[in-house]
Every structure is written in structure tokens, then in C-alpha cells.
Amino acid sequence: MSKTFTYAVFTALPLSRAWKLFTDIGLWPSFTGLYRDLRWEGEPWQPGSAILGRLVHPLPIPLRYVIRRYQPEELAEFIGHSTAAGFATNRSIRFSSAEARTQIQTISFGIGSPPLPGGMAEFIGKIQKTFLSGFAEYCDQAAMQEVSPKRSSFLRMQAASEVQTASADRRTELGILA
């Protein structure tokens, strides 16, 4: 039986900048702590190519994410599997503009039984929440850094407000009250 998981976050970083950071897989370990030794097999982001490496949490296993679909600044879809674990997932990550922010949404489903107490639901949930929340925080930090000292204090306050709004949205999505 397959398990489905949907999760969304917002960031103050414009869509094109957020997408650029997302597509640099070398950054993934720095904002999540989930991955190690990521590298491409084949041409990056082309259908049939794969991201290889290691998943270190919640289950330490080798990984292979095979790209199914890729539409720049909109969608990345891949199948994740590991022969060492006995299960597979399909993940779609979609980017869209939402007012002055960027929304990043994932829809994932999996089959098989990861050796975790909560099974597939726990596995997909932990990966997606950790990945997207960490990525959105990374993007928000980048948004704050883009507000240079040369800009007016009004623009810096506006950027800080947008980051706080995005952070509040993430807390709400995680069920954390401010």
C-alpha cells in the first residue's frame, strides 16, 4: 500500500533565486544535514540522470534519485530508491510565486516498508519536513544577505518583515504556535 505526503513552505527569496539554490545539489547537505556525498550520474537535471549519495537521517542508506521530469523554475520530480532499504518514493517539488514570496510544495508517495517505527509515513514525513523547512530557512537567510548596507533601512526592515512572515508560515505549517 502506498503512503502519500504533502507539505509546503514559503520563503522571502524570489522564485528564480530560490530555484537556483535548490538546483545546486552541493548545497543540500548544508541546509538539511540529511545528505552526504551527493553527485550526478549523467547530465544534471535531465530525465534519466540520477543524484547519487548517502542519506544519513532518518535512515542511513545509499540513495539514488532518478530524475523523471524537470521544468526550470517550476518542477523537479524524481524517484528515490535504495536497494539496501527495500522501498521506493516518488517526489515532486513544485515552486510558485505567492505574492512577494515563493511557495515550495512537495507531494511524495512511497511503497515498501522502511525499518522505522512509523514505516513509510514517518520516513517520507521526516525527509520532506526536514528538507523543505531547512531549505526555506536557508533561502530566508540568503534573502536577508541580499539586502545590502547600501539599501535604505526601510528596505532592510521590509525584507526582515518578509522573512518573519515566511518563518511564521513555516511555524504554522509545523503546528508550532508563535
Image (cartoon, helix red, strand yellow):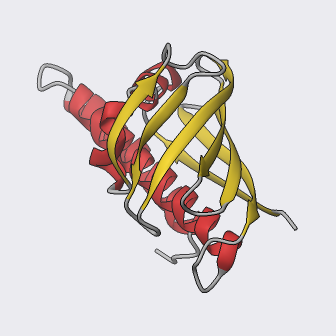
| Picture coordinates of residue 140, whole percent (x, y) | 36, 42
User: Residue visible at 57% across and 80% down?
Assistant: 116
Q: Is residue 140 above or below residue 131?
A: above
Query: In the drawing, does residue 66 fall left or right of residue 44?
Result: right
Q: Along the line of sight, which residue is nearer the eye, 124 or 52?
A: 52
Q: Quadrant of the N terminus?
A: bottom right
For the question of whether residue 114 can be seen, the reply is yes
User: Residue visible at 55% across and 19% down?
Assistant: 45
For the question of whether residue 96 can be seen, the reply is no
Query: In the drawing, does residue 8 fall left or right of residue 132?
Result: right
Q: How many marks?
A: 0
| Picture coordinates of residue 83, whole percent (x, y) | 59, 54
Q: Residue 99 occupies which quadrant of the picture?
A: top right
User: Residue visible at 60% across and 86% down?
Assistant: 117
Q: Is residue 54 above or below residue 86?
A: above
| Picture coordinates of residue 156, whole percent (x, y) | 25, 34
| Picture coordinates of residue 121, whole percent (x, y) | 69, 71
Looking at the image, the residue that sits furthest to the front is 83
User: Residue visible at 58% across and 75% down?
Assistant: 175
Q: Residue 155 occupies which quadrant of the picture?
A: top left
Q: Residue 13 occupies which quadrant of the picture?
A: top left
Looking at the image, the residue that sits furthest to the bottom is 117
Q: Along the line of sight, which residue is nearer the eye, 174 or 62?
A: 62
Looking at the image, the residue that sits furthest to the right is 1
Q: Along the line of sight, which residue is nearer the eye, 4 or 172?
A: 4
